[in-house]
Image (cartoon, grey):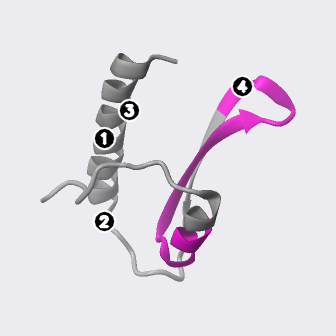
Amino acid sequence: MPDSTSRPTMITREKGEDIRRYATATLTVGRNPDNPEEVRSDLVVDPLMPPICSLRLAHILRDIADHLEVVHGVEGC
């Protein structure tokens, strides 16, 4: 099974809103507004969109994690 077809990229808020219109799954990561020291994440799956195999989603998330680790090694926090 192929992993994700492209590397993650930084996009504008407008592009993100466009993507969410057709996304089956959306991963959000952000600071908890009630506790800014806490970082939280949510994976939202839209039951009205065509399903994507959870194993394929896992492979894509691993690809993204690998990419972020490489970027961190170059840019740091």
What is the three-letter code of the residue carrying label 3?
Answer: Leu
Q: Crowding near pointer 4: few (<14 within 10 Å), some, many (20+)?
A: few
Quarter of the figure with the N terminus: bottom left
Work out whether mark 2 precedes mark 4 in sequence or the reverse, and give the earlier one.
4
Q: Residue at label 2?
A: 53
Reply yes or no: does residue 33 show up in magenta: yes
Task: Confirm or deny contact between disc 3 and disc 4 (CB under 8 A).
Answer: no
Q: Is residue 52 above or below residue 4?
A: below
What is the three-letter code of the residue carrying label 2?
Answer: Cys
Q: Crowding near pointer 3: few (<14 within 10 Å), some, many (20+)?
A: few
Q: Residue at label 1?
A: 62
What's the magenta region? 17-39
Q: Secondary structure at mark 1?
A: helix
Q: Residue furthest right?
A: 34
Q: Residue furthest left?
A: 1
Work out whether mark 4 precedes mark 1 in sequence or the reverse, and give the earlier one.
4
Task: Confirm or deny contact between disc 2 and disc 4 (CB under 8 A).
Answer: no
The label number, if any, that marks residue 68 in the structure image: 3
Q: Is residue 69 above or below residue 32?
A: above
Q: Residue at x 47, y 48 (%)?
A: 10
What is the three-letter code of the residue carrying label 1?
Answer: Arg
Q: Crowding near pointer 2: few (<14 within 10 Å), some, many (20+)?
A: few
Classify residue 71 by image quadrant. top left
What is the three-letter code of the residue carrying label 4?
Answer: Glu
Q: CA distance from mark 2 to mark 4?
A: 30 Å
Q: Residue at label 4?
A: 38
Q: Position of residue 76 (x, y in %)?
A: 45, 16
Q: Residue at x 35, y 20 (%)?
A: 74
Q: Is residue 35 above or below residue 58?
A: above
Please name whichever residue, 30 or 73, is drawn nearer the observer in this view of the structure.
73
Please name whichever residue, 59 or 69, is drawn nearer the observer in this view of the structure.
69
Q: Position of residue 15 (x, y in %)?
A: 55, 66
